[in-house]
Amino acid sequence: MAELVHSPLFGLLLTLASYRMATWLYGKVHSLPLFHPFIVASIPVIVVLPLVGVSYTEYRDQTQVLSFLLGPATVALAWPLYRQLHTVRSVWRPILITTFIGAALAAGISIYLAWMLGAPEAVVGSLAPKSITTPIAVEVVKSTGGYVSLAAGAVAITGIVGALVAGLVFRMLRVKDDRIRGFALGLVAHAIGTARAFEFSEKAGAFAGLALGLTGLVTALALPWLWPLISPWLFPG
Amino acid sequence: MVDGLLILLLFQFLGELVIHFTGLPLPAPVVGMVLLLLALMFSVPYSDRVADASGALIRHISLLIFPLGVGIVLQWERYSDYALALTVAVILGTIVALVLVTLLLKLLLRERGKAGERGGRADG
Protein backbone atom coordinates (compact mmCIF):
# COMPACT_ATOMS: atom_id res chain seq x y z
CA MET A 1 0.00 0.00 0.00
CA ALA A 2 2.68 2.47 1.04
CA GLU A 3 4.59 2.09 -2.21
CA LEU A 4 1.62 3.48 -4.15
CA VAL A 5 2.44 7.03 -3.12
CA HIS A 6 6.04 6.73 -4.31
CA SER A 7 5.34 6.94 -8.03
CA PRO A 8 4.94 9.82 -10.51
CA LEU A 9 1.30 8.76 -10.88
CA PHE A 10 0.57 9.79 -7.31
CA GLY A 11 2.24 13.20 -7.54
CA LEU A 12 0.60 14.01 -10.86
CA LEU A 13 -2.84 12.86 -9.69
CA LEU A 14 -2.57 14.95 -6.52
CA THR A 15 -1.43 17.99 -8.50
CA LEU A 16 -4.08 17.76 -11.21
CA ALA A 17 -6.90 17.04 -8.77
CA SER A 18 -5.89 19.97 -6.53
CA TYR A 19 -5.47 22.28 -9.50
CA ARG A 20 -8.80 21.27 -11.06
CA MET A 21 -10.60 21.83 -7.77
CA ALA A 22 -8.88 25.23 -7.47
CA THR A 23 -9.82 26.40 -10.98
CA TRP A 24 -13.42 25.33 -10.32
CA LEU A 25 -13.49 27.38 -7.12
CA TYR A 26 -11.81 30.32 -8.88
CA GLY A 27 -14.65 30.36 -11.42
CA LYS A 28 -17.22 30.17 -8.60
CA VAL A 29 -15.81 33.29 -6.87
CA HIS A 30 -15.64 35.19 -10.19
CA SER A 31 -11.84 35.20 -10.41
CA LEU A 32 -11.22 36.93 -7.08
CA PRO A 33 -7.40 37.27 -7.06
CA LEU A 34 -7.12 36.05 -3.45
CA PHE A 35 -8.57 32.70 -4.61
CA HIS A 36 -6.01 32.31 -7.40
CA PRO A 37 -5.74 28.60 -8.33
CA PHE A 38 -2.11 28.68 -7.28
CA ILE A 39 -3.01 29.55 -3.67
CA VAL A 40 -6.03 27.25 -3.39
CA ALA A 41 -4.34 24.26 -5.08
CA SER A 42 -1.38 24.48 -2.74
CA ILE A 43 -3.51 23.75 0.34
CA PRO A 44 -4.35 20.06 -0.36
CA VAL A 45 -0.80 19.41 -1.61
CA ILE A 46 0.77 20.94 1.50
CA VAL A 47 -1.54 18.90 3.74
CA VAL A 48 -1.38 15.55 1.91
CA LEU A 49 2.37 15.22 1.21
CA PRO A 50 3.51 15.09 4.88
CA LEU A 51 0.55 12.81 5.74
CA VAL A 52 1.58 10.11 3.25
CA GLY A 53 5.30 10.61 3.88
CA VAL A 54 6.38 12.02 0.53
CA SER A 55 9.13 14.66 0.78
CA TYR A 56 9.04 17.82 -1.31
CA THR A 57 12.09 16.70 -3.30
CA GLU A 58 10.37 13.42 -4.14
CA TYR A 59 7.15 15.24 -5.11
CA ARG A 60 9.17 17.51 -7.41
CA ASP A 61 10.69 14.45 -9.09
CA GLN A 62 7.26 12.85 -9.46
CA THR A 63 5.89 15.92 -11.25
CA GLN A 64 8.94 16.51 -13.45
CA VAL A 65 6.90 16.12 -16.63
CA LEU A 66 5.02 19.33 -15.77
CA SER A 67 8.21 21.26 -15.05
CA PHE A 68 9.71 19.99 -18.29
CA LEU A 69 6.85 21.58 -20.24
CA LEU A 70 7.91 25.01 -18.93
CA GLY A 71 10.64 24.95 -21.61
CA PRO A 72 8.28 24.66 -24.60
CA ALA A 73 5.86 27.03 -22.79
CA THR A 74 8.58 29.70 -22.82
CA VAL A 75 9.22 29.17 -26.53
CA ALA A 76 5.44 29.38 -27.00
CA LEU A 77 5.40 32.98 -25.70
CA ALA A 78 6.72 33.99 -29.12
CA TRP A 79 3.21 33.43 -30.51
CA PRO A 80 1.22 36.05 -28.50
CA LEU A 81 4.21 38.38 -28.80
CA TYR A 82 4.14 38.02 -32.59
CA ARG A 83 0.36 38.52 -32.74
CA GLN A 84 0.49 41.69 -30.67
CA LEU A 85 3.50 43.24 -32.38
CA HIS A 86 1.09 44.26 -35.15
CA THR A 87 -1.54 45.84 -32.90
CA VAL A 88 0.88 48.19 -31.12
CA ARG A 89 3.01 49.48 -33.99
CA SER A 90 1.84 53.06 -33.38
CA VAL A 91 3.11 53.19 -29.79
CA TRP A 92 6.25 51.08 -30.04
CA ARG A 93 8.56 53.83 -28.79
CA PRO A 94 6.92 54.55 -25.38
CA ILE A 95 6.30 50.79 -25.04
CA LEU A 96 9.97 49.93 -25.48
CA ILE A 97 11.15 52.73 -23.18
CA THR A 98 8.72 51.56 -20.49
CA THR A 99 9.84 47.95 -20.92
CA PHE A 100 13.49 48.78 -20.30
CA ILE A 101 12.90 51.17 -17.39
CA GLY A 102 10.05 49.12 -15.93
CA ALA A 103 11.91 45.79 -16.05
CA ALA A 104 14.89 47.43 -14.31
CA LEU A 105 12.60 49.02 -11.70
CA ALA A 106 10.63 45.84 -10.97
CA ALA A 107 13.81 43.83 -10.45
CA GLY A 108 15.82 46.64 -8.84
CA ILE A 109 13.28 47.57 -6.16
CA SER A 110 13.00 43.97 -4.95
CA ILE A 111 16.74 43.43 -5.02
CA TYR A 112 17.24 46.62 -3.02
CA LEU A 113 14.52 45.92 -0.43
CA ALA A 114 15.64 42.33 0.18
CA TRP A 115 19.29 43.34 0.36
CA MET A 116 18.57 46.24 2.74
CA LEU A 117 16.70 43.87 5.08
CA GLY A 118 19.68 41.54 5.24
CA ALA A 119 18.77 38.70 2.87
CA PRO A 120 21.79 36.66 1.67
CA GLU A 121 22.96 36.53 -1.93
CA ALA A 122 21.01 33.40 -2.95
CA VAL A 123 17.74 34.84 -1.62
CA VAL A 124 18.25 38.22 -3.30
CA GLY A 125 19.18 36.39 -6.52
CA SER A 126 15.95 34.39 -6.30
CA LEU A 127 13.86 37.59 -6.15
CA ALA A 128 15.54 39.38 -9.06
CA PRO A 129 13.36 37.74 -11.74
CA LYS A 130 10.10 37.92 -9.74
CA SER A 131 8.21 40.15 -12.18
CA ILE A 132 8.73 37.89 -15.18
CA THR A 133 6.65 34.95 -16.25
CA THR A 134 7.54 31.78 -14.35
CA PRO A 135 9.01 29.62 -17.13
CA ILE A 136 11.52 32.36 -17.93
CA ALA A 137 12.12 33.21 -14.25
CA VAL A 138 12.95 29.58 -13.47
CA GLU A 139 15.58 29.60 -16.23
CA VAL A 140 16.99 33.03 -15.31
CA VAL A 141 17.34 32.21 -11.61
CA LYS A 142 19.93 29.58 -12.52
CA SER A 143 22.21 32.42 -13.67
CA THR A 144 21.77 34.42 -10.44
CA GLY A 145 22.49 31.43 -8.21
CA GLY A 146 19.06 31.59 -6.56
CA TYR A 147 16.67 28.87 -5.39
CA VAL A 148 14.20 27.67 -8.02
CA SER A 149 11.36 27.06 -5.57
CA LEU A 150 11.82 30.48 -3.92
CA ALA A 151 11.90 32.22 -7.30
CA ALA A 152 8.79 30.36 -8.50
CA GLY A 153 6.94 31.15 -5.28
CA ALA A 154 7.98 34.82 -5.38
CA VAL A 155 6.80 35.07 -8.99
CA ALA A 156 3.39 33.60 -8.08
CA ILE A 157 2.94 35.91 -5.07
CA THR A 158 4.06 38.93 -7.12
CA GLY A 159 1.38 38.15 -9.70
CA ILE A 160 -1.31 37.73 -7.07
CA VAL A 161 -0.35 40.95 -5.24
CA GLY A 162 -0.25 42.86 -8.53
CA ALA A 163 -3.69 41.60 -9.55
CA LEU A 164 -5.09 42.35 -6.07
CA VAL A 165 -3.93 45.99 -5.86
CA ALA A 166 -4.31 46.92 -9.55
CA GLY A 167 -7.89 48.19 -9.25
CA LEU A 168 -7.00 50.45 -6.31
CA VAL A 169 -3.74 51.72 -7.87
CA PHE A 170 -5.45 52.62 -11.17
CA ARG A 171 -8.29 54.40 -9.34
CA MET A 172 -5.89 56.39 -7.17
CA LEU A 173 -3.72 57.38 -10.14
CA ARG A 174 -6.85 58.08 -12.23
CA VAL A 175 -5.84 55.76 -15.05
CA LYS A 176 -8.61 55.06 -17.54
CA ASP A 177 -6.51 54.15 -20.56
CA ASP A 178 -6.70 50.38 -21.03
CA ARG A 179 -3.35 50.34 -22.78
CA ILE A 180 -1.73 51.67 -19.59
CA ARG A 181 -3.67 49.34 -17.30
CA GLY A 182 -2.79 46.33 -19.43
CA PHE A 183 0.85 47.12 -20.02
CA ALA A 184 1.53 47.98 -16.36
CA LEU A 185 -0.16 44.76 -15.20
CA GLY A 186 1.66 42.56 -17.69
CA LEU A 187 5.02 44.16 -16.93
CA VAL A 188 4.83 43.91 -13.14
CA ALA A 189 2.54 40.89 -12.64
CA HIS A 190 3.23 38.67 -15.73
CA ALA A 191 0.62 35.98 -16.56
CA ILE A 192 -1.53 36.51 -13.47
CA GLY A 193 -1.58 40.26 -14.17
CA THR A 194 -2.45 39.52 -17.80
CA ALA A 195 -5.48 37.47 -16.73
CA ARG A 196 -6.54 40.43 -14.54
CA ALA A 197 -6.03 42.83 -17.48
CA PHE A 198 -8.44 40.81 -19.63
CA GLU A 199 -11.09 41.61 -17.01
CA PHE A 200 -10.68 45.32 -17.86
CA SER A 201 -10.94 44.75 -21.62
CA GLU A 202 -9.63 42.76 -24.57
CA LYS A 203 -7.33 45.67 -25.42
CA ALA A 204 -5.89 45.75 -21.88
CA GLY A 205 -5.30 42.01 -22.15
CA ALA A 206 -3.44 42.34 -25.44
CA PHE A 207 -1.17 45.04 -24.02
CA ALA A 208 -0.58 42.93 -20.91
CA GLY A 209 0.41 39.94 -23.04
CA LEU A 210 2.84 42.12 -24.96
CA ALA A 211 4.33 43.49 -21.73
CA LEU A 212 4.69 39.98 -20.33
CA GLY A 213 6.63 38.82 -23.38
CA LEU A 214 8.83 41.91 -23.68
CA THR A 215 9.67 42.12 -19.96
CA GLY A 216 10.49 38.41 -19.85
CA LEU A 217 12.68 38.76 -22.88
CA VAL A 218 14.51 41.89 -21.71
CA THR A 219 15.08 40.51 -18.20
CA ALA A 220 16.23 37.13 -19.48
CA LEU A 221 18.64 38.77 -21.90
CA ALA A 222 20.00 41.35 -19.42
CA LEU A 223 20.08 39.69 -15.99
CA PRO A 224 22.60 36.89 -16.74
CA TRP A 225 25.08 39.59 -17.87
CA LEU A 226 24.25 42.18 -15.20
CA TRP A 227 24.05 39.90 -12.15
CA PRO A 228 27.82 39.15 -12.06
CA LEU A 229 28.32 42.96 -11.92
CA ILE A 230 25.64 43.72 -9.30
CA SER A 231 26.27 40.75 -7.03
CA PRO A 232 29.92 41.44 -5.98
CA TRP A 233 28.96 45.06 -5.32
CA LEU A 234 26.06 44.09 -2.99
CA PHE A 235 27.88 41.15 -1.43
CA PRO A 236 31.59 41.93 -1.32
CA GLY A 237 33.86 39.04 -0.42
CA MET B 1 -1.43 20.26 -31.78
CA VAL B 2 1.29 17.74 -32.66
CA ASP B 3 2.67 20.15 -35.26
CA GLY B 4 2.76 22.90 -32.65
CA LEU B 5 4.51 20.77 -30.05
CA LEU B 6 7.00 19.60 -32.65
CA ILE B 7 7.79 23.21 -33.63
CA LEU B 8 8.12 24.33 -29.99
CA LEU B 9 10.47 21.47 -29.08
CA LEU B 10 12.45 22.02 -32.27
CA PHE B 11 12.99 25.70 -31.48
CA GLN B 12 13.88 24.91 -27.88
CA PHE B 13 16.48 22.48 -29.23
CA LEU B 14 17.76 25.15 -31.65
CA GLY B 15 18.11 27.39 -28.59
CA GLU B 16 20.16 24.67 -26.88
CA LEU B 17 22.36 24.39 -29.98
CA VAL B 18 23.00 28.15 -30.08
CA ILE B 19 23.94 28.16 -26.39
CA HIS B 20 26.13 25.08 -26.81
CA PHE B 21 28.14 26.62 -29.63
CA THR B 22 28.30 30.23 -28.40
CA GLY B 23 28.47 29.73 -24.62
CA LEU B 24 26.05 32.64 -24.11
CA PRO B 25 24.84 32.88 -20.48
CA LEU B 26 21.16 32.73 -21.54
CA PRO B 27 18.31 30.31 -20.92
CA ALA B 28 17.95 28.05 -23.99
CA PRO B 29 14.11 28.34 -24.12
CA VAL B 30 14.44 32.15 -24.27
CA VAL B 31 16.79 31.86 -27.24
CA GLY B 32 14.27 29.43 -28.76
CA MET B 33 11.53 32.00 -28.21
CA VAL B 34 13.51 34.72 -30.01
CA LEU B 35 14.27 32.34 -32.91
CA LEU B 36 10.59 31.38 -33.19
CA LEU B 37 9.56 35.04 -33.08
CA LEU B 38 11.96 35.76 -35.95
CA ALA B 39 10.63 32.75 -37.87
CA LEU B 40 7.07 34.05 -37.43
CA MET B 41 8.01 37.61 -38.44
CA PHE B 42 9.71 36.35 -41.59
CA SER B 43 6.73 34.07 -42.31
CA VAL B 44 8.76 30.87 -42.32
CA PRO B 45 6.44 28.16 -43.76
CA TYR B 46 4.33 26.27 -41.18
CA SER B 47 5.65 28.39 -38.28
CA ASP B 48 2.12 29.67 -37.57
CA ARG B 49 1.05 26.12 -36.74
CA VAL B 50 2.33 26.75 -33.20
CA ALA B 51 -0.92 28.60 -32.40
CA ASP B 52 -2.88 25.73 -30.78
CA ALA B 53 -0.08 24.20 -28.75
CA SER B 54 1.14 27.65 -27.66
CA GLY B 55 -2.30 28.68 -26.49
CA ALA B 56 -2.75 25.45 -24.53
CA LEU B 57 0.63 25.68 -22.80
CA ILE B 58 0.32 29.39 -21.97
CA ARG B 59 -3.22 28.98 -20.59
CA HIS B 60 -1.94 26.42 -18.10
CA ILE B 61 1.30 28.06 -17.05
CA SER B 62 0.13 28.15 -13.41
CA LEU B 63 -0.29 24.36 -13.48
CA LEU B 64 3.17 23.83 -15.01
CA ILE B 65 4.84 26.05 -12.43
CA PHE B 66 2.83 24.74 -9.50
CA PRO B 67 5.15 21.90 -8.34
CA LEU B 68 8.08 24.34 -8.24
CA GLY B 69 6.19 27.26 -6.71
CA VAL B 70 4.65 25.25 -3.90
CA GLY B 71 8.19 24.65 -2.68
CA ILE B 72 8.21 28.14 -1.16
CA VAL B 73 5.85 26.75 1.49
CA LEU B 74 7.13 23.17 1.67
CA GLN B 75 10.74 24.31 2.04
CA TRP B 76 9.85 27.27 4.24
CA GLU B 77 12.36 26.30 6.96
CA ARG B 78 15.05 27.11 4.38
CA TYR B 79 13.71 30.66 3.93
CA SER B 80 12.06 31.46 7.28
CA ASP B 81 15.14 33.34 8.55
CA TYR B 82 14.54 35.93 5.85
CA ALA B 83 10.76 36.09 6.20
CA LEU B 84 10.70 39.87 6.72
CA ALA B 85 13.02 40.63 3.79
CA LEU B 86 11.02 38.28 1.54
CA THR B 87 7.62 39.63 2.52
CA VAL B 88 8.62 43.28 2.15
CA ALA B 89 10.55 42.76 -1.09
CA VAL B 90 7.79 40.76 -2.74
CA ILE B 91 4.66 42.58 -1.53
CA LEU B 92 5.87 46.18 -1.11
CA GLY B 93 8.26 45.84 -4.06
CA THR B 94 5.40 44.76 -6.33
CA ILE B 95 3.10 47.60 -5.27
CA VAL B 96 5.84 50.24 -5.67
CA ALA B 97 6.84 48.84 -9.06
CA LEU B 98 3.21 48.85 -10.26
CA VAL B 99 2.71 52.48 -9.19
CA LEU B 100 5.97 53.65 -10.80
CA VAL B 101 5.38 51.77 -14.07
CA THR B 102 1.82 53.13 -14.27
CA LEU B 103 3.06 56.71 -13.70
CA LEU B 104 5.77 56.24 -16.31
CA LEU B 105 3.23 55.01 -18.87
CA LYS B 106 0.90 57.89 -18.03
CA LEU B 107 3.74 60.29 -18.71
CA LEU B 108 4.87 58.66 -21.96
CA LEU B 109 1.40 58.01 -23.38
CA ARG B 110 -0.15 61.28 -22.17
CA GLU B 111 -0.90 62.89 -25.54
CA ARG B 112 -2.19 59.74 -27.17
CA GLY B 113 -3.84 58.65 -23.93
CA LYS B 114 -6.16 61.65 -23.90
CA ALA B 115 -7.09 61.06 -27.50
CA GLY B 116 -7.74 57.39 -26.75
CA GLU B 117 -9.96 58.22 -23.78
CA ARG B 118 -12.03 60.63 -25.80
CA GLY B 119 -12.40 58.01 -28.51
CA GLY B 120 -13.42 55.47 -25.88
CA ARG B 121 -16.15 57.70 -24.51
CA ALA B 122 -17.44 58.42 -28.00
CA ASP B 123 -17.70 54.68 -28.65
CA GLY B 124 -19.39 53.89 -25.39
Image: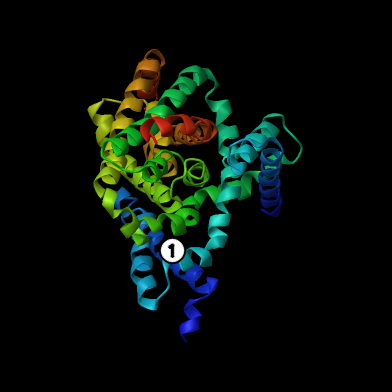
Number of numbered discs on residues: 1
Considering depth in this image, is A84 or A123 the residue closer to the camera?
A: A123
Q: Residue furthest top?
A: B111
Q: Is residue A176 visible?
A: no
Residue A66 x/y as whole percent = 54, 59
Considering depth in this image, is A83 or B58 the residue closer to the camera?
A: B58
Q: Is residue B15 above or below residue A46?
A: above
| Residue at 50% from the left image edge and 32% from the top image edge | A210
Q: Is residue A7 above or below residue A222?
A: below
A233 on left or right of B95: right
**Where is residue A164, by image quadrant?**
top left
Q: Residues within 10 Å of mark 1 (few under 14, many from 20)?
A: some
Quadrant assignment for the C terminus of chain A: top left
**Where is residue B99, by image quadrant?**
top left
Q: Is residue B106 visible?
A: yes
Q: Residue furthest bottom?
A: A1
**Disc 1 sits on a residue from what chain?**
A
| Residue at 42% from the left image edge and 47% from the top image edge | A151
Residue B62 x/y as whole percent = 45, 52
Mark 1, residue position: A20
Q: Is residue B92 above or below residue A53?
A: above
| Residue at 47% from the left image edge and 36% from the top image edge | A212
Q: Is residue A58 above or below residue B67?
A: below
| Residue at 34% from the left image edge and 43% from the top image edge | A120
**Where is residue B18, by image quadrant?**
top right
B101 on left or right of A59: left
